[in-house]
Image (tube, rainbow, N blue to C red):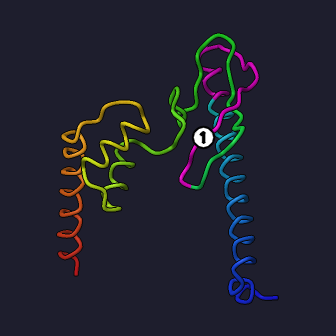
């Protein structure tokens, strides 16, 4: 059975998509764990600290949710890999989320309401508006740059 045949069957296509997603998430997880371990080694050399096992946590990525990510710990210092901010559970920033929602057609008030619900913090429509203004300006600059090259 070739790939074209598989993709023409919705059930088989869904199974293939799920297998591919699982594989990608697994590879991203392995990469982040390896990266964090290497970073801890460097951290320990610089601070004269020692490794002290691992803790696990979940992390939302653009590829999906990673469960049971092994995050290395140190004994004396408060080590955290560069890609994990304390209490942060995702790899995307607030500004990226706002931009994606705006590009998806959400109004500034809708975005502020959604962020308030999701993050339990008050993000005013004016904050969202300022971020959107910066994004719109960058888009305009990119369009002018592209037109200049054509």
Asked whether 42 falls inside the magenta stretch, the response is: yes
Residue 20 against residue 4 in the figure, above or below? above
- Crowding at dot 1, Cα within 10 Å, few <14 / some 14-19 / many 20+, comes out as some
Where does the C terminus fall, quadrant-wise?
bottom left
Across and down, in percent, residue 49 comes to 66, 14
Q: Quadrant of residue 74?
A: top right
**Name of the residue lying farthest toward the right:** 1
Whether residue 14 is situated above or below residue 127 in the rendered picture: below
Q: Viewer-proximal residue, 37 or 105?
A: 105
Q: Is 98 placed left or right of 144 in the picture? A: right
Q: Quadrant of residue 32?
A: top right
Residue 63 on image: x %, y %: 59, 55
Residue appearing at x 18%, y 51% in the figure: 133
Q: Is residue 65 left or right of residue 125?
A: right
**Which x, y percent locates residue 4?**
70, 89
Q: Say whether residue 2 is magenta.
A: no
Quick one: which residue is furthest to the top in this view? Answer: 76
Q: Position of residue 69 (x, y in %)?
A: 69, 38
**Residue at 21%, 50% in the rendered image:** 134
Location of mark 1 (residue): 59
| Residue 1 position (above or below residue 78) | below
Q: Secondary structure at mark 1?
A: strand
- Total marks shown come to 1
Classify the position of the N terminus by image quarter. bottom right
**For this view, does 52 lie left or right of residue 46?**
right
Q: Is residue 96 left or right of residue 24?
A: left
User: Which residue is at 69% across, 42% downward?
Assistant: 67
Give the residues drawn in magenta, as a range: 40-62
Who's the residue at 35% across and 55% down the image?
101
Above or below — where is 124 with respect to 66? above
């Amino acid at each position: 059975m070739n790939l074209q045949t598989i993709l023409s069957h919705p059930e088989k296509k869904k199974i293939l998509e799920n297998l591919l997603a699982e594989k990608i998430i697994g590879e991203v997880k392995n990469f982040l764990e390896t990266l964090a371990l290497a970073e801890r080694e460097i951290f320990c050399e610089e601070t004269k600290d020692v490794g002290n096992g691992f803790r696990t946590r979940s992390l939302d990525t653009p590829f999906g949710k990673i469960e049971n990510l092994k995050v290395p710990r140190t004994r004396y210092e408060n080590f955290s890999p560069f890609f994990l901010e304390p209490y942060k559970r995702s790899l995307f920033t607030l500004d990226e989320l706002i931009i994606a929602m705006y590009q998806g057609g959400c109004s500034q008030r809708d975005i502020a309401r959604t962020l308030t619900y999701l993050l339990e913090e008050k993000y005013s429509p004016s904050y969202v508006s300022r971020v959107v203004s910066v994004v719109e300006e960058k888009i305009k600059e990119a369009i002018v740059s592209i037109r200049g090259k054509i």
